[in-house]
Image (spheres, grey):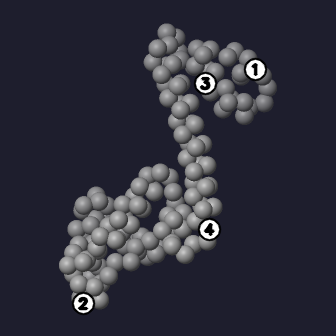
Amino acid sequence: MKSSAVHPWSVGDVAARFDLPTNVLRHWETVGLLRPVRDPAGRRKYGEDEVVRIAVIQRSKAAGMSLEQIGVLLDDGSAGRHQVLQAHLDDLDRRMDEMRRSREMTEHAMGCRSHDIATCPRFRAGVADVLARFEGPHLTERA
C-alpha cells in the first residue's frame, strides 16, 4: 500500500476543498471514476492523482459531459475515446451557437424601444429558427 504522505487527504478533506458532498466522491468511486487507496482502517485516502481526476471530472461535468463520457475520457484503454470526444465537441459547438444567438437576442432586447419585446420584428427574427418548427408562414411572416 502507498504511504499516507503520498495520499494525505481524507474523503472529507477532498470534499470540502472541492465544495462537494462526500457522497458524490463515493458515487464517483462506485461508477469507477475514482480509485482512492484505503488506509489500514479502510478509510479512503486521496493523493495528487485522484485530486487531478476530481478536477477533470468537475470541469468535464461543467462542460456538459455525462459520467459515462467522463469514464471513457479517463479510461486510458478506451477505444472509443475519440468518438466520445468528437461527439462532445459537436455538442459544445451546437450549444455555443445557441449561446451566441441568445446573447445577440438579449443585446438587441436591451436596446429595443418596443414595450413588448415579442412584437419587435428584429427581436422576433432572433427566434425565427425556433418558430420554424410550427407549420405555416403566419408565425414568421411578421419578422
Amino acid type for the residue under numbered disc 3 = Gly
Q: Nearer the viewer, residue 67 or 136?
A: 67
Q: Which residue position is annotated with label 3?
A: 126
Q: Which residue position is annotated with label 1?
A: 138
Q: Secondary structure at mark 1?
A: helix
Amino acid type for the residue under numbered disc 1 = His
Q: Give the mark nearer the N terminus: 1 vs 2.
A: 2
Kindly indicate whether the residue at mark 2 contacts the one at mark 1 (C-beta within 8 angstroms): no
- Image x and y of residue 52, in percent: 35, 65
Location of residue 10 (image quadrant)? bottom left
Q: Nearer the viewer, residue 116 or 121?
A: 121
Residue 40's disc is 2
Q: Is residue 9 left or right of residue 37?
A: left
Amino acid type for the residue under numbered disc 2 = Pro
Task: Report the Cα–Cα distance between label 4 and label 1.
Answer: 46 Å
Check disc 3: other Cα within 10 Å, few if <14, some if 14-19, many if 20+.
some
Of all residues, the one furthest to the top in this rendering is 113
Mark 4 against mark 3, which lies toward the viewer? 4
Mark 1 against mark 2, which lies toward the viewer? 2
Task: Report the Cα–Cα distance between label 3 and label 2.
Answer: 61 Å
Task: Report the Cα–Cα distance between label 4 and label 3.
Answer: 37 Å
Residue 17 visible here: yes
Q: Nearer the viewer, residue 27 or 68?
A: 68
Q: Which residue position is annotated with label 4?
A: 80
Q: Is residue 142 left or right of residue 19?
A: right
Residue 119 visible here: no
Residue 130's disc is none
